[in-house]
Image (spheres, rainbow, N blue to C red):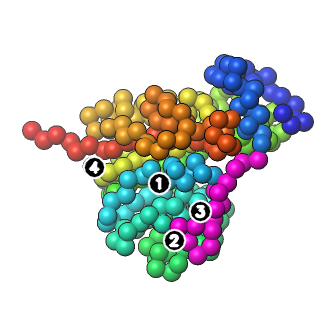
């Protein structure tokens, strides 16, 4: 561990989840993140975690229409989506934070050719509040939701964040994540794909949030397990942890498909 003073609540919370594995997992979280250069369809390479590439590539893209990257900054996953888009598909890269949106715009301008960039719009709305609006219902042919999360790797490396951490934090974030995921599902077109991503390692923010979607929309939400082999299978998705994945992650990915409603 670094020279940071440990937080007993943080340690107890994650040791209860990972037991004897926690020591090695914590050590791996303190090591430098492993990144790879993503080059496909880009003017210049962009470095990001290999898990982020897998998460973005797991979204099943339609041939035409509009897809949404709901929490897009700093832009790496948007670049992966852009690389996979066909000529009749467009992307709305959304980021509510003005500062982070500025970085997102910079990344898109630096890495994409003019034609691809012309099919990517950038917006700044709060995705959690859009699902209930009539004009937003069934709007997108695919949605990637990389939700704000605990980011335990960051917490462990930040003295202030570690000192302030409380068990209520994952619960608070899980409520925010649920609001975003539920709204995303409402904005998703029937038959389309929704990928839920976090960089958290707590079940509360991962399978716990994903299970709420299946429970609330059980007649429409179909679990569509990610098909990449990396990581560990959870009840509803895949979890890539750096202690056993060569420094990749942490990253949780759950994928869903919205079914067509049965008609009488």
x and y percent of residue 9 in the render?
Answer: 75, 23
Element carrying mark 4: strand
Mark sitting earlier along the chain (4/1)? 1
Q: Which stretch appears magenta? A: 32-48
Q: How far apart are marks 2 and 1 (CA)?
A: 14 Å
Residue on which the image places disc 1: 57
Element carrying mark 3: strand
x and y percent of residue 99 in the render?
Answer: 67, 62
Q: How far apart are marks 4 and 1 (CA)?
A: 18 Å
Q: Residue 41 carries which label?
A: 2
Instruction: Specify whether residue 42 is painted magenta.
Output: yes
Q: In this view, does 180 lie above or below 208?
A: below
x and y percent of residue 10 in the render?
Answer: 74, 27
Mark sitting earlier along the chain (1/3)? 3
Q: Distance between the residues labelled 4 and 2?
A: 27 Å
In percent of the image, x 38 and y 68: which residue is there? Answer: 86
Residue on which the image places disc 3: 38
Query: Nearer the observer, disc 3 or disc 4?
Result: 3
Residue on which the image places disc 4: 191
In-image side of 136 versus 26 (left or right):
left
Q: How crowded is mark 3: few (under 14 residues within 10 Å), some or many (20 or more)?
A: some
Report the front residue among 27 and 160: 27
In percent of the image, x 44 and y 50: which residue is there? Answer: 58
Q: Is residue 110 above or below residue 250?
A: below
């Amino acid at each position: 561990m670094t020279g940071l003073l440990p937080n007993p609540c943080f340690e107890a919370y994650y040791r209860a989840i990972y037991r004897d594995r926690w020591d090695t997992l914590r050590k791996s979280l303190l090591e430098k993140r492993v990144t790879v250069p993503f080059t496909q369809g880009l003017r210049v390479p962009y470095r990001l975690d290999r898990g982020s590439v897998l998460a973005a590539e797991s979204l099943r893209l339609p041939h035409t229409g509009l897809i949404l990257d709901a929490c897009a900054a700093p832009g790496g996953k948007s670049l992966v989506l852009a690389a996979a888009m066909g000529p009749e598909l467009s992307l709305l890269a959304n980021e509510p934070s003005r500062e982070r949106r500025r970085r997102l715009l910079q990344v898109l301008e630096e890495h994409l050719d003019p034609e691809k960039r012309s099919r990517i719009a950038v917006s700044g709305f709060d995705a959690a509040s859009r699902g209930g609006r009539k004009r937003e219902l069934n709007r997108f042919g695919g949605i990637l939701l990389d939700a704000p999360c605990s980011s335990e790797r960051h917490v462990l490396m930040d003295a202030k964040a570690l000192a302030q951490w409380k068990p209520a934090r994952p619960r608070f974030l899980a409520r925010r994540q649920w609001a975003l995921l539920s709204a995303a599902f409402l904005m998703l077109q029937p038959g389309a794909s929704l990928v839920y991503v976090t960089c958290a390692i707590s079940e509360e923010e991962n399978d716990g949030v994903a299970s709420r979607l299946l429970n609330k929309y059980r007649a429409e939400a179909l679990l569509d397990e990610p098909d990449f082999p990396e990581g560990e299978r959870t009840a509803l998705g895949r979890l890539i942890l750096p202690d056993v994945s060569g420094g990749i992650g942490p990253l949780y990915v759950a994928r869903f498909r919205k079914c067509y409603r049965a008609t009488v």
